Image (tube, helix red, strand yellow):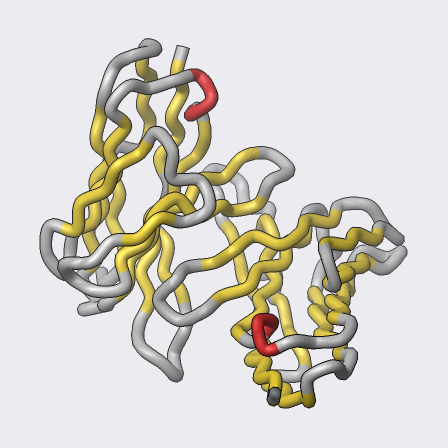
Amino acid sequence: NAGVTQTPKFQVLKTGQSMTLQCAQDMNHNSMYWYRQDPGMGLRLIYYSASEGTTDKGEVPNGYNVSRLNKREFSLRLESAAPSQTSVYFCASSGPPPDYGYTFGSGTRLTVV
Amino acid sequence: SQELEQSPQSLIVQEGKNLTINCTSSKTLYGLYWYKQKYGEGLIFLMMLQKGGEEKSHEKITAKLDEKKQQSSLHITASQPSHAGIYLCGADSPTSGTYKYIFGTGTRLKVLA
C-alpha cells in the first residue's frame, strides 16, 4: 500500500547514544518532513526537505541531523541522544500544489534514559 | 470517524483587515491545534487549545475553543502579508492501539499589500 514507512516503531536509548530513524515514501512526493510530538505541544517541525538534495531547519533542529538520501528516503539522526529528545517522531511527505495534503508515517516512540 | 471541517476554504484580504477562520469537528475535541503552512516548508505549530471556552493569543493571532469543544476559530487582527499561507487545524483522534492525528481541510489565506 502506498504511504510513508517509518522504522523503528519503538526505541530506547541511553543518554549519549546515537541512532538513525528511517523514513521512506512511495508516492513520488517532493517534500518530506520530520516532526516531533510532545504532550501539549502539538507537532513541531524538526527538519524538512522541499525536494531531493535540499534540507532546511524547522522550529526545533538542535540535536538532530537529516539526510535526503534520494527522492524516497529521508532519515533523521540523533548523534548524542538526550532525555529531552524523548518524544514521538513522525515522518511525513506532501505533494505539490494544489494538493497540500500530508501523509504521515505511523510514528516512532523514542525514550532516552 | 472524526472529521475536521474548515471554513472558508480560501480567503483574500487587504492588508490591515481582520479575518476569522473556523474549524468544526464532528465530535468533541480533546486537543485542538492550529498550524500555519507554506508550501514545502512544513507545518508551523501556532497554538493548542484543550479546555472549553479557552482562548490563546500569539502576537496578532487569537484562537478560541467553544464551550462544547466542537468548534474553534482563529482570528487574525490587522493582517499583514507575512500572515499569508495555509492554516490548518489538527486534532488527536482517539483511536485505540495506534496513534492517529487528523487535519482539517485547510484555509488558504492571501493578504494583499
Q: Nearer the viewer, residue B55 or A72?
A: B55
A39 relative to B5, above or below: above
Query: Outermost residue, left direction?
Result: A70
Q: Nearer the viewer, residue B75 or A38?
A: B75
Q: Can residue A62 be seen in this snapshot?
A: yes
Q: Report the residue at 64% width, 73% height from top.
A: B5
Taking B66 as reference, is B38 left or right?
left
Query: Outermost residue, front direction?
Result: B113
Where is the C terminus of chain B found, in terms of image quarters?
A: bottom right
Number of numbered discs: 0
Q: Can residue B105 be seen in this snapshot?
A: no
Residue B37 percent across, percent down from the top left: 49, 66
Residue B44 percent across, percent down from the top left: 51, 56
Where is the N terminus of chain B found, in terms of image quarters?
A: bottom right
Q: Report the residue at 33% width, 27% height from top.
A: A10
Residue B62 percent across, percent down from the top left: 77, 61
Residue A2 percent across, percent down from the top left: 23, 63
Residue A46 picture quarter: top left
Taking B37 as reference, is B14 left or right?
right
Q: Report the residue at 86% width, 57% height from top.
A: B68
B40 relative to A15, above or below: below
Q: Report the residue at 71% width, 74% height from top.
A: B21
B73 relative to B93, above or below: below
Taking A84 as reference, is B112 left or right?
right
